[in-house]
Image: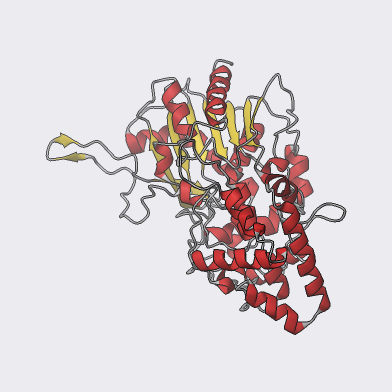
Amino acid sequence: MFVESPIWALLLCLAGGVGRTLAEPLAMRQAQQQRIWTEHLRTGDNTGKQEMPAGIAYEREGFQQRRSINTPYWFDQVIDHFGSNQTFKQRIFINDDEYVPGGPVYLFNSGETPASPAYLSGGEPHTLAKATGGMLIIMEHRYYGKSYPVSNMSGPNMKYLNIDNALEDIAYFIRNAAGFVKDTIGVDISPASKWVATGGSYSATLAVWARKKYPDLIHAAYASSAPVLIEPDFYQYDQVVARALPCASDIASAVSVLDNILDSRNRTLIDKWKKAFALQDLKDDADFAGALTDQMSTTVQYYMPPAKGSDAPDSIAQLCGWFKNTRNIPLQNMADMTAAHIRNNRIDPVSAYSSDSGATNYALYQDGRAWFYQTCTQFGFWQSAPRPPLRRLRSKYVTSEWQSKPCQAFFGKDVSGIPDTQYLNDKFGGLTPDVSRVVFVNGLHDPWSELSVARNLPDSTRNVMITMPLASHVVDFYAANSRTDFGVDIARKNILEAIKMFLAQN
């Protein structure tokens, strides 16, 4: 689902290694958190290679060639399930290597990231398929990756991107999957096969809601770090970050001094500190204030402790190490840390942090732009400064109002950036969804766990809740994580047991 920084060049990678694509600038102050997991979701992606059309023949010179599981297939998906019957090509990946007739079918809608065939051979959905004789299908979310129902991403063209269409995409595919899979890979899906929706972050939210909305189609769901409470003013995010950082008091002190400087309106003093942070090219003072949360937020959200015996540094200790220089005031230490972060990652501050950067770039293949539209129109999720007396690790100028302000510049005057989040919370139940046979998994180090089912399980007789105290966002799910310590191995064992229990139920 989702760092406060306006960087959407990171292209949403939910854990570790932040990749920036400066050819795709956008002031997506919110897109970083949910979207920080793309590097894992894109691992092994085949997008740079020529794609084979669905239904090609695999016979060559009399030999049956085994198709590659990296082969994408293209499903005729309805553009608007509540209007036109026109269709677009939606990218699908399939792995039936472990499938036995009657085994389950695991469906992973890739959410706010491009679909990646890496998940056909790694990650928790693949593990579940291997253990249960299942088939694994990855469905690319509309408006992401290469699955576009429109020719550009201008404001009017974004109208088909909404939760109702996204959920109906899942249902429509399942209803037509038997014929599609038979036509593309020549495999029959048994009528006895039960469907399990899976996902991590926003895609996990889709899995929960799809299970609730279509219980006749989806037998169970596995949801890793699913933010099911839609919160437009997500001030709770910083509370988790503060608990995780030993240097939180130093950061709060630095932010307080910075706010006093911004309040002074002393142009000379403000510009001096912008230069100290290597952010002198940002003209808007609020953009400057908002840029400072990038490194701290991502460090906590995607934190994993170093493996035993590893020489790898602890990322939290490394960050807090900047504040051990007692010769400086905390604000100077924060400036030194931020300047080094920008320099070492070769960040262009204007492209990365300026509110209106990329607003009129309507080209396709901008996953961050699509996510920004969803936050503007339905989710919010604006990570804002907590109100007193709560401790603040970000400037008071970082408000939900400021973060939503660019929505109109990007998508037109009809997109206010003040979404009706109550509609989704009422429809799907927020933190108490009326669902059954769902495995909710969360790391309590994850700020998004505040919006997930991580502490109070609705109807424990019908659902399972698994928490990992030292883990963060989606660590149990993604393909790049081979770690088995800090509770991940126990969580995965319990996930499998829960799924087997659900599959045994009628």
Picture mark count? 0
Residue 451: x and y in percent read 72, 42
Q: Is residue 134 found left or right of 407 in the rendered image?
A: left
- For the C terminus, the image quarter is top right
Residue 428: x and y in percent read 72, 38
- Identify the residue at horizontal 54%, vertical 31% (top origin): 488
Judging depth in this view, the residue of 470 and 202 nearest the camera is 470
Q: How is the image coloured?
A: secondary structure
Which residue appears farthest toward the bottom when viewing the image?
Answer: 268
Which residue appears farthest toward the right when viewing the image?
Answer: 389
Judging depth in this view, the residue of 368 and 90 nearest the camera is 368
Which residue appears farthest toward the left when viewing the image?
Answer: 61
Q: Is residue 282 found left or right of 459 in the rendered image?
A: left
Res 322 → quadrant: bottom right
- Identify the residue at horizontal 38%, vertical 27% (top origin): 188
Res 136 → quadrant: top left
Residue 12: x and y in percent read 54, 54
Q: Is residue 296 visible?
A: yes
Judging depth in this view, the residue of 18 and 96 nearest the camera is 18
User: In the rendered image of this protein, does residue 295 appear above or below residue 217?
Assistant: below
- Identify the residue at horizontal 58%, vertical 63% (top origin): 7
- Identify the residue at horizontal 43%, vertical 43% (top origin): 92
Q: Is residue 115 found left or right of 203 in the rendered image?
A: left
Residue 385: x and y in percent read 77, 58
Q: Is residue 419 visible?
A: no
Which residue appears farthest toward the front when viewing the image?
Answer: 327
Judging depth in this view, the residue of 53 and 433 nearest the camera is 433
